[in-house]
Image: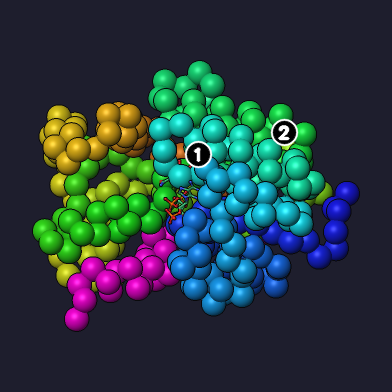
Amino acid sequence: MTRTASPTYLVTGANGTIGARTVAALRAQGATVRAGVRRLDQGAPLAALGATPVHLDFTDPASLAAAFDGVDRVLLLTPFVEDALPLVDAALSAAQAAGVDFVVRLSAQGAAEDAPFALARAHAAAEGRVRQSGLRWAVLRPTFYMDNTLGFQGGAIAQTGAFYGANDGAVAWISSVDVGAAAAAVLADPDAYAGQTYGLTGGEALTQAQLAEQIAEAAGRPVGYVNVGPAALRASLEGQGTPAWQVQALMDLETIKGNGWAAGTTDAVQRLLGRPPLTFAAHLGHSAAAVAALWPA
Ligand SMILES: NC(=O)c1ccc[n+]([C@@H]2O[C@H](COP(=O)([O-])OP(=O)(O)OC[C@H]3O[C@@H](n4cnc5c(N)ncnc54)[C@H](OP(=O)(O)O)[C@@H]3O)[C@@H](O)[C@H]2O)c1
């Protein structure tokens, strides 16, 4: 049974891509939300949404204890790091100590203990910890975010009119808006969703060349996609001093996209939100500020 009529929610990584969208969606429901941020001086946009920014660093147990105290439901997302398991364990310990009722884990599509890729195995291990925590739980496994292109390669687009990769595969990209809304919907109804795992995708598979066409249309400027091939991408990443684990993880993600392994769609967004997933064009509309920021006036 749901523990409180008016629960307090905690969103970890609240100023990141999915955290901020989840805070916005929870606040749109009128929920009481704590926005966990590493740096409180970055909490203003979350406070403007009506959330309460709280200091939360997974590597600082005292911050976890304070952030989780009095919380009923948590979105547990961890950053893209080599080993997120200690961060997940620390958060779950704090959740258990605080008597948290329900944890929603942001995982990733393809999470599996026997997956051929380290990132997918790591996500499966984290899911295992959440499932074995003794708390009520749900798991969301989104596919690649529509936000990645502007988020990771906005600078390249602005400077060269193109973004770069090593695959021509189609991917059923999902908008962070939909992931945040799905997280908020699941968090809001533990009785309905506890014990469930949802694979979240967009409604259609698009290649990066197709993304480029749509970004160009939204921006009113030419934007292209260039497949430089795996060897050149790896050399570029290594040349930038990218850590070896991250180079391998990024190359693995290129393999997944290139082989069409992320092209399939699910009906989870429709089932959770009662509407279809956002199209890429609609997502760009929600990201108009990010598009405009590429070419400041
Ligand atoms: N990108 C994709 O296409 C994709 C697809 C599926 C799943 N995922 C998964 O999504 C997760 C990342 O979510 P996201 O894209 O929303 O992340 P994000 O935008 O990179 O944000 C990460 C957040 O974590 C915070 N953070 C970093 N270190 C922290 C620490 N020690 N303690 C507390 N907070 C910390 C960051 O805070 P600061 O701002 O202070 O750094 C930031 O708010 C990863 O698990 C990734 O595997 C990604």
Image quarter in which the C terminus is found: bottom left
Q: Name the residue under label 2.
A: 133
Which quadrant of the structure image shows residue 70?
A: bottom right
**Does the segment drawn in magenta span residue 102?**
no
Determine the secondary structure under disc 1. loop
Q: Is residue 182 above or below residue 103?
A: below
Image quarter for residue 50? Answer: bottom right
**Reading the chain from its start, which is encountered first: label 2 or label 1?**
1
- In this figure, which residue is indicated by the disc labeled 1? 108
Residue 49 drawn at (x, y percent): 57, 74
Indicate which disc residue 83 carries.
Answer: none
Residue nearest the observer in this picture, 122 or 289: 122
Q: Residue at coordinates 58% horizontally, 66% vertically from top-left?
A: 53
Residue 90: x, y in percent? 61, 38
- Outermost residue, top direction? 114
The answer to whether residue 282 is magenta is yes
10 Å crowding of disc 2: few (<14), some (14-19), many (20+): some
Helix, strand or loop at mark 2: loop
Q: Which of 160 and 34 is in front in this view?
A: 34
Residue at the spot 62% in from the left edge and 48% down from the top edge: 62
Kind of residue sitting beneath label 2: Ser
